[in-house]
Image: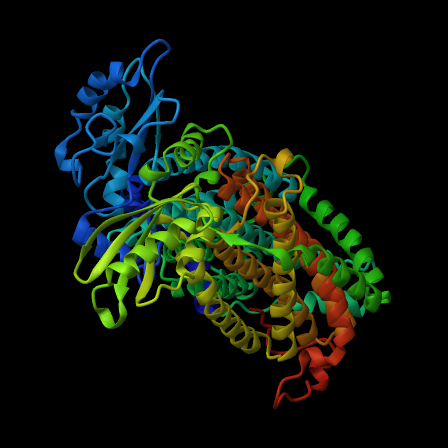
Amino acid sequence: MKVWAGLVVARPKLVLVAAVLFALACGLFATGLAEKVSAAGFTDPASESSAVDAWVKEQFGPQNPDVIAIYTAPEGQTLDDIGARVQESVGRIDPGLLDRPVETYWNSARKQYLRSADGRHAVAVVFAAGDDNRRIAVFPEIEESLRVPGIETELTGYSALADDISAQSRRDLIIAESISIPLTAIVLVLVFGGVVAAALPVAVGTLAVIGALGAVGIIARFTEVSIFAMNVVSLLGLGLAIDYGLFVVGRFREELGRARGGELGDGSGGSGRDSRIGADAGTRRGDPLDEGDSAGSGRDPDVGAAVVRTLQTAGRTVLFSALLLMCAFAGTLVFPQSVLRSLGYGAMAAVGLAALLSVTVLPAALALLGTRIGKWSWRADAFERSEERAQRFWGRVVTAVMKRPGTVAIAVGALLLVLAAPLTGVRLGDIDHTALPAGNETRLATEELAAEFPAANSGATVVLRGIDGAAPRSAAVSTALREISAVHGVRQAVQIGTKDNAAVIHAALAAPDRSPDAQEIVKDLRALEIDGATVRVGGQSAATADSVTAVLAKLPLMIVVMVAVTLLMLALAFRSIILPVKAVLMAFLSLAATFGVLTWIFSDGHLAGVLGVSVGPLSAGMMVLIIAVVFGLSTDYEVFLLSRMVEAHEAGADTEESVRIGTVQTARVITAAATLLVLITGAFALSPLTPMRFLGLGMVIALVIDATLVRMLLVPALVKLMGEANWWTPGRRTRTAALASGYSEEPAKTF
């Protein structure tokens, strides 16, 4: 980092131009990204349902409809009166888009199943050709012909739902950015006291989003990438770049003030040894810049010194933090669903670009701006006065915590456990029609289809095989039809045919596809025991149940990967055994409290009406995303906080002094960073889509809990209680007397 700092100070214009051009060049690959990403990828390709559906499709054709149109005869007309117009319109669908001809009430041999009991509604069932992505992509073309002018038409089915959710997701992204970016800019101006300093993190965040979207575009050329990856890139790229920018710019102004003799103090309101430790943990005026020395370059040497010191401390912390976050998101790669893996790809791209630009564009711009970083401020000392007020406030808070660390730890810990209590009754599901807002046409059509036309729905596909792979006996098939029909929630069981030593039965379900009720019916079907035969179940509801099972099966592996990497890297960074363990435990405590609140709202239904969300099981996929983000951000803030504590301790402070100095010097940055991320992620809570609201509210809750209760109260209290054990590691030697006195020949390091 010292070598890089020297290059940035010596050639800031070159570094700035190269970094900006690199981000923009990456962004070129984002062209047409909306057409390359997928709305599918939610199934486990190795599951029982995938195997059943693939075999049945090969032998009998697809059994899961892509689009289902529900037609209502106008007042005074019958279904027979509108039949010719519907058939004519449906006949205009390009045959190349279809796996087989469209089946309607008017051309089907099973008319009774495609008409409602009151005789006013009838359906058309469409099976599109191609893989999941193509079947969803051609929906707009199919929709155009299915809608008949003058006849009320409702559309549902897998492709219709996926298209509706994808379109809304793209609109949400635009709305979220249009709201969050201006609000973020205003808050940054308030934090930094000026426009110039505030503009830098926003500029870096914009470049990070552009570059990360381009990186996702490159990945999409080689593997399936979900539409939701674009939302994650926007959320994390902008949020983390601004967080990192806040940390780097704040540290630069702090170091520049110290280099010019404007020490802000450590927040204690005192002087003497405390202030000296705070200064030694930051920089000492007159330190050589080595290769980064700007003397003779025509630039202010104090500015060069501040940039070098900022990169050696804040820059190192940013890179280390980003590496931890990327390792956390790498845990998503263990899941078989492409949608979860692509969320990991997008998140890692966003985090990597945000960190890279924060240690290239930002320091180069700071080297060029120098003292002009404070331009366009409402008063010359706005930042310094704001910093002093924050340090006085947090100084009082941490002093109170240090007086009664045990009481604080017990009180905050108990509160977090109370918040986590609802998690004991958590239910997991996946995205279904209830992701759409109440009153949405597609959602209403899905519910109407299940109630009026269960035979036209996907339902469940049951494959019956004899023992040892032999063809099932007719008695076994008859028994299976009887037992399947008797399962609660099954409207009808019909044999499709027999082929390759297997009988295929379609079970019409009374619940909408993919819904929790439909998944429970699938479980009951799989629990059936038929003498002389084995039962395997496919269909969309079975695929959803298998997807949730796969998430639960792989989740422990994801957690092991995150925890192992975090423990190892933090142990190496802080040269401590206790601090990394505490960091991981704090992250999981934050997660437990967050999911407890989410369960209370989304699963138990409290405040659901006020917030406009659908009550039901928590989305397993979104849960994985929130675990990765919250665990990473918790560790991220822990690194920011502990790095300053370690700096102070390395400079000679005892444990209590280190806690006080570290907390005071980072409290404003952490709370400001959390506030900015709340604005950015909270904008997604405005989405009418329940999964997006789940993500937005989950992030807001997690950030508020982690940045206040955990990071500013519980962590300082626990570090104080653990005393010298914080700094213990096998083979660690006692620091020298010179270091203990508050001076070291070696600059203090932070990661």
Query: Of 186 and 382, which appears nearest the observer?
Result: 186
- Report x, y in % for residue 476: 30, 61
- Report x, y in % for residue 486: 42, 50
Q: Is residue 284 visible?
A: no
Horizontal side of 421 relative to 563 (left or right) equals right
- Report x, y in % for residue 141: 23, 30
Q: Residue at x 56, y 65 (%)?
A: 313
Query: Can you tell which quarter of the image residue 66 is in?
Result: top left
Query: Of 167 and 315, which appears nearest the observer?
Result: 167
Horizontal side of 564 relative to 384 (left or right) equals left
Query: Of 246 and 297, which appears nearest the observer?
Result: 246
Query: Of 711 and 465, which appears nearest the observer?
Result: 465
Q: Residue at x 37, y 58 (%)?
A: 341
Horizontal side of 333 relative to 293 (left or right) equals left
Q: Relative to 71, does residue 655 appear above or below in the rendering? A: below
Q: Which quadrant of the figure contains the C terminus?
A: bottom right
In the current view of this chain or complex, which residue is farthest to the front?
475
Q: Relative to 545, does residue 227 appear above or below in the rendering? A: above
Q: Residue at x 54, y 35 (%)?
A: 686
Query: Can you tell which quarter of the image residue 184 is in?
Result: top right
Count of numbered tags = 0
